Image (cartoon, rainbow, N blue to C red):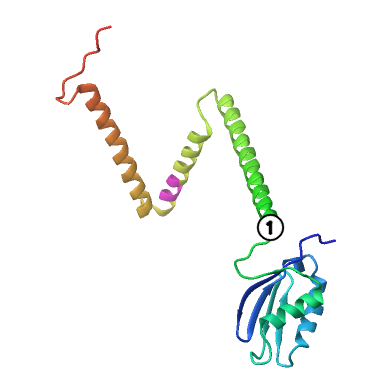
Amino acid sequence: MNHELRIIQLLHATPGRTRLRLGWLRGSPQDAEPLAEHLATLDASMEVRVRPWTGSVLCTYDAEALDETAIVSAVRRHTGVAIVLRPGEVHPEVDAAERAALRRAAHEHGTTRRAVTSAFRELNHDLVRATGGRLDLGSLTGLGFLALGAAEILSAREVPAPPWFQLAWWAYRTFTISGGASEEAEEATGPEGNALEPADA
């Protein structure tokens, strides 16, 4: 049984074209075809497309014979739904449901992230213990990439040029590392290049 709050959302309306969203159709797809048949009786030239998997209801019709008010009224009569939301309007119950769904999604994402992080931490601990502290996941990953690079060079028999984004990253890292080293050297020697003596206790 579908317990979703039944609301008719008017997404947009122009002369001769109206689009609605009935989100609850996703849980009641059997209601889609009867609704389309009912709307089609309003105007012989009317074309109705109902997509239950998205809840979309698109009506194209003679603008001189019908307008969006008549379409919405017909949907309300057929479905018994009283709540109609215009573009930009939000129903408190829908807003609360969407916020709750976002909180659930954020919690599930956080739980998954923590589980993955914990699994990698345990794997890293086991690897360090098994190798007597000689390897961890970081160094093993680096060695793996190094082996893949060597295999690529051996198979191509040439050293391929690295892509531009790697060159840019290396340049940035070299600049920041050398800059930090220069600052440390200056702090150690003083501005005039003389070594700083430790202060007397």
Q: Residue at x 28, y 36 (%)?
A: 178
Identify the image quadrant of residue 146.
Answer: top left
Tell me where residue 75 appears, x and y as whole percent. 76, 77
Q: Residue at x 76, y 88 (%)?
A: 42
Tell me where residue 176 appears, x and y as whole percent. 31, 39
Tell me where residue 19 appears, x and y as whole percent. 65, 77
Which type of secondary structure does the marked residue at label 1 adopt? helix
The stretch drawn in magenta includes residue 141: no
The stretch drawn in magenta includes residue 152: yes
Q: Amino acid at mark 1?
A: Pro
- Between residue 96 and residue 163, name the one nearer to us: 96
Residue 137 in the image: above or below residue 131: below
- Badge 1 crowding class, 10 Å Cα cut-off, few under 14, some 14 to 19, many 20 or more, is few
- Between residue 89 and residue 149, name the one nearer to us: 89
Q: Identify the image quadrant of the C terminus.
A: top left
* Farthest residue, direction right: 1
120 sits to left or right of 146: right
Q: Residue at x 64, y 38 (%)?
A: 115
Q: Say which residue label 1 marks.
A: 92
Residue 113 in the image: above or below residue 47: above
Identify the image quadrant of residue 125.
Answer: top right
Residue stretch rendered in magenta on the structure: 149-154
Regarding residue 97, the answer to whether it shows in the image is yes
Residue 25 in the image: above or below residue 100: below
Tell me where residue 21 appears, x and y as whole percent. 69, 71
- Between residue 192 and residue 25, name the one nearer to us: 25
* Farthest residue, direction top: 201
